[in-house]
Image (tube, helix red, strand yellow):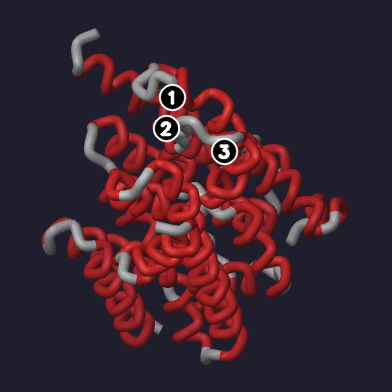
């Protein structure tokens, strides 16, 4: 198998993946969010290409767009990005060849990459992951444009429905990924505590609520597992 | 956009706030991937905090929403989120069903309540 064939195989894997359609819906919502928070379409596209992580992007636009401090936003993004670290596995590949697939690494690409890579020869796995990543990013960029334009042109009710894609799809995506008590509690407590903190205008409320809710969930998990 | 972000310029803000704090983990991943304990307590705690922060952003987007979502009454927004979540739980943890039911409830609520 040539590198080009492995790349094409990756691209086919991406377009036939159900995650690609979830990705499309998520980024339609993201494009609409960018529009309504006052960012330009080029900015929205650059952010999708550079950050390439749905949660981080939504944190960036919603914090910068709603008046929370940039420092708080950066810390929140940094925390959300830690999950990417263990997704990267790098046996016997040169450093510079890993920069691109590492940048493409996000939950959707990681899941599909792990699924198909074992069937490929080792030296073709990077090309395959690049094929998956390039295709998924192209889909996300098209979706960002679609969402931005829909928010700009549709009547208010339809634009609101497009905008609602972000909170709705993120809620069920997190819930789907939540298997342990830790994740479920962190989700529930974050949903409940953050509005209280923001209502009372607590300094750095989003981070403070997240730290408290996350730590409570962590402690609860430890207590239950009896350590 | 708020003033702090505007002072930085939207693209500089994007790199400082969005790109660097996120990309650093991918870069570190390349370097440390071979000696990483995935179940380490620190990573577990970080995962819990990150999940809670994202949940907080979801709550904020629904309670104090941007753009035309504001014109949909709050009970309709919160009810739609809850309905979508319940549908997701009932129908085989399907993301598609959850999002679809949530969206339909939102539209119905907007038409009935406003």
Q: Is residue A111 visible?
A: yes
- Kindly indicate the quadrant of the structure image that contains residue B45: top left
Q: Which residue is mark 1?
A: B43
Residue B47 — which label? 2
In the picture, measured across the screen, residue A227 lies left or right of residue B1, that is: left
Q: Residue at x 41, y 30 (%)?
A: A214
In the picture, measured across the screen, residue B104 lies left or right of residue B70, that is: left
Q: Residue at x 43, y 64 (%)?
A: A5
Q: Which residue is mark 3?
A: B26
Q: List the single residue furthest toward the top.
A: A227
Q: Residue at x 29, y 30 (%)?
A: A182
Which chain does the numbered disc 3 sit on? B
x, y percent for residue A119: 28, 49
Neighbour tally class for label 2: few under 14, some 14-19, many 20 plus, Cα within 10 Å:
many
Q: Residue at x 56, y 55 (%)?
A: A52
Q: Are marks 2 and 3 on the same chain?
A: yes
Which callout, 1 or 3, points to the residue nearer the camera? 3
């Amino acid at each position: 198998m040539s590198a080009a064939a492995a790349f094409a195989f990756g691209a086919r894997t991406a377009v036939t993946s159900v995650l690609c359609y979830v990705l499309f819906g998520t980024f339609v919502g993201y494009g609409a969010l960018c529009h309504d928070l006052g960012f330009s379409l080029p900015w929205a596209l650059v952010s999708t290409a550079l950050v390439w992580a749905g949660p981080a992007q939504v944190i960036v636009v919603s914090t910068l767009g709603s008046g929370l401090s940039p420092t708080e936003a950066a810390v929140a993004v940094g925390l959300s990005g830690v999950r990417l670290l263990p997704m990267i596995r790098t046996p016997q590949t040169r450093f510079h060849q890993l920069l691109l697939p590492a940048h493409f690494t996000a939950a959707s690409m990681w899941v599909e990459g792990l699924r198909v890579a074992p069937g490929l020869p080792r030296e073709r796995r990077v090309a395959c992951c690049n094929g998956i990543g390039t295709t998924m990013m192209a889909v996300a960029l098209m979706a960002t444009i679609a969402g931005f334009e829909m928010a700009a042109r549709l009547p208010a009710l339809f634009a609101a429905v497009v905008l609602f894609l972000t909170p709705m799809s993120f809620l069920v995506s997190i819930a789907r990924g939540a298997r342990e008590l830790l994740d479920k509690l962190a989700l529930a407590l974050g949903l409940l505590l953050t509005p209280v903190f923001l209502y009372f205008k607590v300094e750095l409320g989003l981070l403070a609520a997240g730290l408290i809710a996350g730590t409570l969930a962590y402690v609860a998990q430890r207590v239950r597992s009896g350590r | 956009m708020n003033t702090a972000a505007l002072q930085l310029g939207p693209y500089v803000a994007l790199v400082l706030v969005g790109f660097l704090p996120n990309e650093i983990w991918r870069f570190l991943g390349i370097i440390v991937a071979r000696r990483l304990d995935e179940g380490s307590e620190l990573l577990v705690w970080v995962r819990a905090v990150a999940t809670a922060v994202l949940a907080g952003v979801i709550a904020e987007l629904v309670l104090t929403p941007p753009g035309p979502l504001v014109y949909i009454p709050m009970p309709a927004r919160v009810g739609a989120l809850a309905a979508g979540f319940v549908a997701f739980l009932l129908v085989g943890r399907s993301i598609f069903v959850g999002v679809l039911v949530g969206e339909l409830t939102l539209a119905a609520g907007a038409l009935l309540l406003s």
